[in-house]
Amino acid sequence: MNGKIFIMDNDFERLKEWVDHRRYPSFRAKQILEWLNKGTINPEQMTNIPKNIRDALSEDFVTDSFRVVEEWTSEKDGTKKWLFELHDGHRIETVLMPYSTGLSVCISSQAGCKMGCSFCASAKAGFGRDLTCGELLAQVTLPSALVNERISRVVIMGIGEPFDNFEQLKRFFRMINDESGPNIGARHITVSTCGLIPQMIEFMCIGMQVNLAVSLHASNDLLRRQLMPIAHRYPLNELIDACRQYVEKTGRRITFEYALLAGVNDTDEQARELARLLRGIHCHINLIAANEFPGGAYKKSSKERAVSFMSVLEKNKMTVTLRREMGSDIMAACGQLRRGMQETL
Ligand code: SF4
């Protein structure tokens, strides 16, 4: 990158400094930011900015990133998925899902992932690097520009473990929430973690109203360690304790994600064990159909099994939903597209 930062890593303050440093009129900072918020990162397309300033932007910042490698649209439900190539060749996925309540975008936090969950396509493709806050932000503004519609919800559940890229994530929260930025309310943002406890503790202390989801996927340590190596570092009793602290400190409900894997974690007994584990926590359990991908070891549970698992939880007074599968015809689940493309390259 030759020491240059990505143009979208600039917030209003940084743009003002740059404009002052270059001795341009200060109102140019606001104009440039308005273009960035509209998903325009190529200065050549900033039509109300004079040519000398456009050239200076290209000279000082990375502006040739986020090339659309592929774009898919689901015929079943209109879900869209993009494979973007960043300026240094790393590829990331972003998924846009239309709901009756508005558009929801699922963004990646890293190019690849170090966490190694055995059921996940992203883990199989290895780790590239952390994304910058501007690269997180661009996954909201670019899709919005591409479909010419406002995004109402952001979920950070794509490729990567967001809490493993915590500094950039915190800057992203500030920038997306800012009045001079896309101004999406914290309550409309959800971040998902596989359970990095120190960052969860820090997250609950920063006082933002961003929603927290924890990927659980198992009701006991033995099975969780097989599925998620992070469970060796942070056992369930410590994780659940941190979740209870989060609910107590923030007064907010926590979501537990549970991917149903056929014959692995989907028996009625495991549902009862899960209910015992989470009893007394103000929470919502989100059951997900597991992602099947070429070379993957797991199959998703049958519809009947999923319904039975859910009804055991309901009988135990848990709040639970079976998530609608979005974009299943375009491999819309985390990491599948990037991996599929790597296999065909
Ligand atoms: S499930 Fe999430 S945390 Fe686990 S390997 Fe995949 S992307 Fe990483």
Image (cartoon, helix red, strand yellow):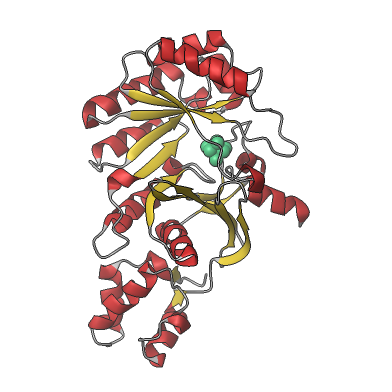
Residue 82 percent location from the top left of the image: 58, 57
Residue 265 seen in the figure: no
Q: Residue at x 55, y 42 (%)?
A: 326
Is the residue 215 above or below the residue 68 in the image? above
Comparing 297 with 13, the one in front is 297
Q: Residue at x 34, y 29 (%)?
A: 254
Left or right side of 83 for 201: left
Q: Quadrant of residue 36?
A: bottom left
Residue 107 percent location from the top left of the image: 48, 50
Residue 56 seen in the figure: yes
Comparing 201 with 336, the one in front is 336
Left or right side of 50 for 76: right
Residue 139 percent location from the top left of the image: 46, 58
Is the residue 283 above or below the residue 198 in the image? above
Residue 156 percent location from the top left of the image: 44, 45
Q: Quadrant of residue 150?
A: bottom left
Is the residue 4 above or below the residue 261 in the image? below
* Ligand 1 quadrant in view: top right
Q: Which quadrant does the C terminus fall into?
A: bottom right
